[in-house]
Amino acid sequence: MYSEPLWLAVPPDHPLVGNNTPVALAQLKDEACISIPHPQRGGLSYLSAELCMRAGFFPKAARVMSRKTTQLQLIQAGFGIALLPKSMQDIAPATLHFLPLADPDCLSTVALACAQTPSALVEQFCQTLHECL
């Protein structure tokens, strides 16, 4: 449906806060990451890991890992950092910082999947959603 940039979410006291330049992924190799790929998780954690591997490292796991909405609270509490869609700022705690990434391919693709032959209701929903975006 669309792509949006990934940004780096960091806690309020992170050393990168106040830095006015985009962050290169390679700078994050020693950081604890809240989102690490594992069998029960979906696409964003795998995308984050792939981008970090292209930058020369695999993300170091934080002590606690969680889904996106809980990630925001864990980041704010200082457990680690995460690559998140820029739109997550809209629901993030006010003290959390989102920093732009220097790597141009840090994008998250949002897609909608439905049955090949959807019901009329699902088809109408898909059409309306597509028009709104």
Image (cartoon, helix red, strand yellow):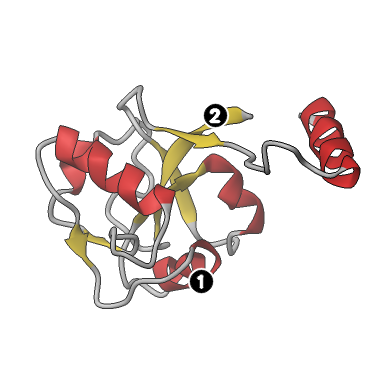
Q: Residue furthest front?
A: 117
Front one among 67 and 123: 123
In the image, what residue occupies the spot 49% across and 72% down? Answer: 73
Label 2 environment density (alpha carbons within 10 Å; few <14, some 14–19, many ≥20):
few
Disc on the earlier residue, 2 or 1: 2
Task: Give the percent coordinates (x, y) of residue 68.
Answer: 50, 62
Give the CA distance from mark 2 to mark 1: 23 Å
Q: Place residue 103 in its image quadrant.
A: top left
Q: Which residue occupies 85% across, 41% down? A: 125
Q: Is residue 53 left or right of residue 119?
A: left
Mark 2: amino acid: Ser
Q: Which mark is residue 45?
A: none
Q: Amino acid at mark 1?
A: Thr
Please tell me which residue lies in front, 70 or 77: 70
SS for tag 1?
helix
Q: Where does the image place residue 8, in percent across and percent down from the top left? A: 39, 46
- Where is the C terminus found, in terms of image quarters? top right
Mark whose residue sits in front, 2 or 1 = 2
Q: Which mark is residue 70?
A: 1
Which residue is most to the left?
56
Coordinates of residue 37 in the picture (x, y in percent): 29, 58
Identify residue for label 2.
3
Is label 2 in a helix, a strand or a loop?
strand
* x 49%, y 65%: residue: 72
Q: Nearer the viewer, residue 75 or 111?
A: 111
Residue 44 showing in the rendered view: yes
